Amino acid sequence: MQQFGKVIHTAFFPGSKRAILARAALLIAVIAMLDWATPRDVPFRLLYLLPMVLVGGVLEPWQIAIVALSCTFLAEVFDDLVWRLHIGVYRDLLYFGAYCGTGMFVREVNRNRKIALEHLGEIARQNEARREAEEQLRILIESSPAAILTADGSGAVLMANEAAYRMLNVAAGEMPGRTIHRYLPSLRNVYRLGGSQQFFRTVMQARAQREDGETFLADICFSTYRTEAGLRLAVMVLDASEQFRSHEVAGLHQLLSASRIAIGAFSHEIRNICGAIEAVHQNLAHDQSLAGNRDFEALGNLIVALERIASVDLRQTTSRSTEIDLDALLDELKIVIAPMLEEKDISLEWRVDSGLPLVWADRPSLMQVFLNLITNSIRAMATRDDGVLSIAAGVREDQVVIEFIDKGGGVAHPENLFQPFQNGASSSGLGLYLSRAFLRSFSGDIRYQPAPGGACFVVSLSIAAGQPV
């Protein structure tokens, strides 16, 4: 039917609708004139089917019926048969049915052809869109810095991108068919649970292995799905070894820095105590009754030893300060503290100016300072129902100032802040002491100022050289 419609459309319907109707009208007129001018025994009535084929492709059904009625009238007028009611009516109905049926048939064939062409065009567009999407997906996978692999239900690798070959040190083209457990042993547990209807979409950090046996720490994102061929596994792998090493080195540096400062605080307190004991020892030395007393001499030697221990140089090593993007650091801080504040039902007011300049600081130490101040505020507001923590940041003169304001009732003895081992304190006081020491190590500082119903700690940071103020 579609091929027949194509033939009809090519043969009879070239040009516009107006041109087709003009040709049909001319053809009807020619047939009528031939029927009138020729002998009566020559049948021209069948020729009216040709103009009906033309109008059937461009007119509506009621218009086709009018043309068919006109052709019926012309065929009857120039017919040599005598018209009688009981015979002429049936003959005219036969003419009309033939003409109108032909037009309707051609119209339906033409309409179906148009629908088929539209469907074919839509299928072609969808195929083209699918081809483009597949091409983009292929480029994305091949250009991804992360290793991407797919495996079947037995763990055999089906596909691996270029990054996977580089990360796992496998020769190009040799990955398909090998078991994925050889490189990612932790995925064995996923296949043990593969018989269930549960699908996995998760991330984990686990040990991975290269082709030469070298192990490394990997962040593994994987998901399972089912196809007609069975269970499938899609895996994305990132080498986290360098990040892990950097994190551990930064943690060690932070621990050593805090330890030096803490031991320095202990040494300071020991020196104070030794000074007091030495003063008492010197006073007792004037008592002649203690002359030659070995216990008294041992006490003097003990004081000297303690002073020597307390005087050990515990100054920090070379600073690791760099230019820090404070906007990014504060965004990370907001992510970290959000669950803590939500758990304690504390509201957060965030008033940070956009476009803060780069500051000079040690990133891990600065984050530790911020977390210490926020932890203190959360502890102070733990028993309150209307806890609010406000964090504001902006540029003042030649510094970036970050304020931490809480509604925790304030500090009873602000003169004792930033001093370790305070008498009567609920904790050691090392948190603020270390925070100030960290900040001063990269030319920053921290100070306390009272706030209505609470406390405000102001952190000042130096703007990196060359940054607009």
Image (cartoon, rainbow, N blue to C red):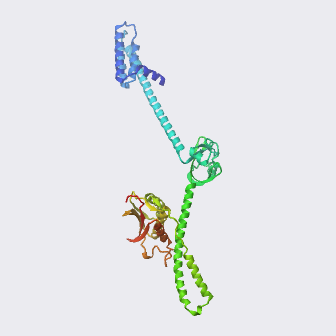
Residue lying at 45% horizontally and 59% vertically, measured from the top left: 323
- Residue 38 spot, x, y in % from top left: 36, 7
- Residue 94 spot, x, y in % from top left: 41, 17
- Residue 434 spot, x, y in % from top left: 49, 69
Closer-to-camera residue (314/329): 314
* Above/below status of 351 relative to 169: below
Q: Is residue 283 visible?
A: yes
* Residue at the top extreme, as displayed: 39
- Residue 373 spot, x, y in % from top left: 46, 67
Query: Where's the C terminus, which quadrant?
Result: bottom left
Closer-to-camera residue (389/275): 275
Q: Does 85 sit left or right of 370 as displayed?
A: left
Classify residue 111 by image quadrant.
top left
- Counting every numbered tag in the picture gives 0
Closer-to-camera residue (341/177): 177
Q: Is residue 76 visible?
A: no
Closer-to-camera residue (135/55): 135
Q: Does 404 sit left or right of 168 as displayed?
A: left
* Above/below status of 429 relative to 357: below
